Image: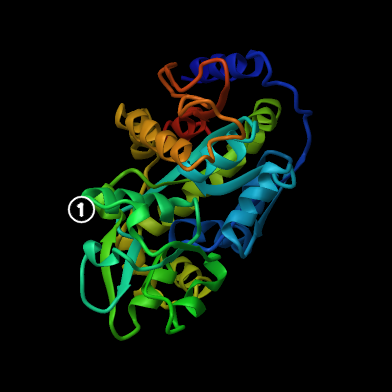
Amino acid sequence: MKRTTLIAALALALTPGLATAQAKDSFKVAWSIYVGWMPWGYLEDSGIMDKWADKYGIDVEIVQINDYIESINQYTAGAFDGVSATNMDTLSIPSGGGVDTTALIVGDYSNGNDAVILKGEGDLTALAGKPVNLVELSVSHYLLARGLDSVGLAERDLGGVINTSDADMIAAYATPEVEAVVTWNPLVSTILEEPGANKIYDSSDISGEIIDIMWVNTDTLAANPDFGKALVGAWYELMALMAAGDEGALTAMAEASGTDLAGYKAQLASTEMFYDPDDAVAFTASPALKDTMVNVAEFLFDKGILGEGAPSADFVGVAYPDGTTTGDPGNIKMRYDTTYMQMAADGEL
């Protein structure tokens, strides 16, 4: 297996246009508050990340950014070597913007954590004519579009979409003029505590489509494989603790996300966490992922955000572990790579 891994790493490094970054020993990754990304904060605070970074003779700083989209923008601008983000937001912002990006750790998919919430009684059809607050062009927007389509509605049937930062969502919901929101946990759990808050659609209705991933710059990873090994090693050490129900770790993550242990466990219950790297590898290698990415690309193109001047939904090429691609094979800017997760599964880190 080590020979196979070495060949894969060499092939990646020798791919034209990839091995342009310099070897270095200091790295920064960004994350934002979300149930499936709380482990990143704990890895930094607990010293687990430092332990794995020391093992490979490097330094890795994990930085919390309070605004999710801003964290992706900073990664795209080169301020970070990696960022926690969904498949859709990565395709539209860094990959669509020309930054070659690799899925290092496929951590989970949302299975109820993202939700459409209506004030008062009703279902998705009740959104007709109503304004909806969400982070525009994020996975919330995608979830809304999928929900509306399921009941024969479209965005034009709403009373408008109001762009609202995740940092402002709870305060916005509390105002009388807001009638419906689309957001993610822990915000969903907090809003649903309000009288009259009614969850009418969530990501379990499109299971496996909103995927939460630690992405890294492809060039940086190719030039610095130890960076990938340290991140993946630290991550799966913590996944083992979480799978075993370590209350110390879980409580710390709960408190950092603004809830208690019971609240955090409730959020995890609507998250399909890949605690075992074998499960992450299997999901990433599944043919269903290609269908999801085609759907996502079509949504982004329809909204005009699949890269500046994108001529079609195939503008950005996406590469998969089996060597196939979707989109433009001449413009590969998103890569699903199971190399490092497989190393964790095989005990090679």
Give residue 18's quadrant in the image.
top right
Relative to 96, is 339 on the left or the right?
left
Q: Quadrant of the C terminus?
A: top right
Identify the residue at horizontal 58%, vertical 61% (top origin).
41
Relative to 233, is 158 on the left or the right?
left
Residue type, numbered disc 1: Val
Relative to 347, is 168 on the left or the right?
right
Identify whether 319 is placed above or below 243. above
Which residue in the protein does label 1 denote?
151
Q: Secondary structure at mark 1?
A: loop
Report crowding for label 1: few under 14, some 14 to 19, many 20 or more residues within 10 A (C-alpha): few
Relative to 266, is 211 on the left or the right?
right
Identify whether 231 is placed above or below 176. above
Q: Position of residue 45 (x, y in %)?
A: 62, 64
> How many numbered callouts?
1
Q: How is the image coloured?
A: rainbow
Q: Position of residue 40 (x, y in %)?
A: 56, 56
Identify the residue at horizontal 32%, vertical 66% (top origin).
129
Q: Position of residue 77 (x, y in %)?
A: 72, 43
Q: Position of residue 314 (x, y in %)?
A: 47, 24
Give residue 53's quadrant in the image.
top right
Identify whether 171 is placed above or below 207. below
Identify the residue at horizontal 56%, vertical 33% (top origin).
102
